[in-house]
Structure formats: C-alpha cells, structure tokens
Image: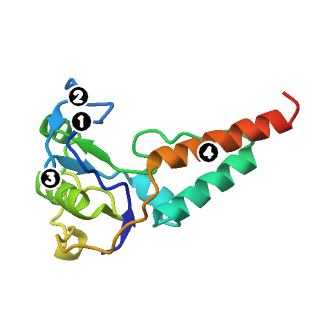
Amino acid sequence: MEYFEDEKPTSGCVCSDPECPCNETSIPVGTGYLYIPKSCCEFRRDCRTRRELHDKAERIARRSNQYMIFGHGVASPILVCEEGAKKRRLDLDVAAKDAKHWWTTGHVPLRPTPRAGDPQVPRADVASHRPAAATSSSSWLVLIAIVVAIGVAVYLANGH
C-alpha cells in the first residue's frame, strides 16, 4: 500500500464534507470516516510528502502568477461523519479504518475510498494501523501563507 503525508490532527475535528447535510458534526479523535477522492490521489501521486506538496503548490503558483488555496479534497482527504459517509455511499469499514490510520500516523492511502457494494477490497488496499515514519513538521497554515505570499509578491511585481 502506498501512502501520502497529510497534517496529523492533534484534537477532535468536525465533519468537513461540503456535501454533507449535517451541521459540522463533531468527530472525536480516532473516529470518523476518511473520504479520499480519486482527484486527490491523482493530484498527490507526484507529491507524497508535505514538503513535495509545498513545492508543487509553489510551482503552480509561480506558473499561474496567482496565489493558491486548495479546496476540499484536492490535496487532502475529507474527514466525514457517518451521515456524510453514507450519503457518499462509502465502504464504511474501509473509510473508518483509513480514518483511524490517518489519526494515528498522518498518512493517507494513495487510492480512492471504495464505494459500498464495490467488489471486496484486497487487504493490501486497506490502511494498516502500524505507526509510520514521522511526518514533516510544517503545517497547512504555513503552506497556505507561503502560497498566498508568493501570489501577492508576483501581483505586486507586475506593477499592480
């Protein structure tokens, strides 16, 4: 199983699925369901570490001469409540195991979350719960701030 690094949460979260009808349901540490969109896997295929993600964001911002803020599910998975997981028809067992692994290690499987009723997922495609290597200490806020700063600098450098 291949993984990519994501911010390892240190406290409880809320459902962050923009398509979920809940009102930001509280999700205690170690629980919930992780929705990994196919588009997220495609985007992260060439940037598995948070450092590589930061570098990719800088390259994209430089080429486009604009600052970047990633939306839900673009560069990171979406933590959802049970209602959201059912609404998306996720395989609840796999999504819950992926969430537990993410809470424990900060690592996300580099494969989309299977849907309920899909053919059985091979064991190699379900996140294990073994601790993984430590992740980078940089945070998403730093990434966003740097990308925004680059965009502003480029904007100002162009005489605006």
Disc 3 or disc 2, which is closer to the eye? 3
Q: Nearer the viewer, residue 67 or 39?
A: 67
User: Which amino acid, mark 3?
Assistant: Gly
Image marks 2 and 1: residues in contact by CB distance under 8 Å: yes
Q: Could you say whether the residue bearing mark 3 is in a helix, strand or loop?
A: loop
Which of pointers 3 and 4 lies earlier in the amino acid sequence? 3
Q: Which residue bears the numbered disc 2?
A: 24
Q: Which residue bears the numbered disc 1?
A: 15
Which of pointers 4 and 2 lies earlier in the amino acid sequence? 2
Q: Nearer the viewer, residue 53 or 38?
A: 53
Q: Residues within 10 Å of mark 4 (few under 14, many from 20)?
A: many
User: Which amino acid, mark 2?
Assistant: Glu
Which of pointers 2 and 1 lies earlier in the amino acid sequence? 1
The quadrant in which the C terminus is found is top right
Q: Which residue bears the numbered disc 4?
A: 147
Q: Which residue bears the numbered disc 3?
A: 30
Measuring from the top left, give residue 122's x and y in whole percent. 19, 73
User: Which amino acid, mark 4?
Assistant: Val
How many angstroms separate mark 3 from mark 4 (CA)? 30 Å
Measuring from the top left, give residue 119's x and y in whole percent. 17, 63
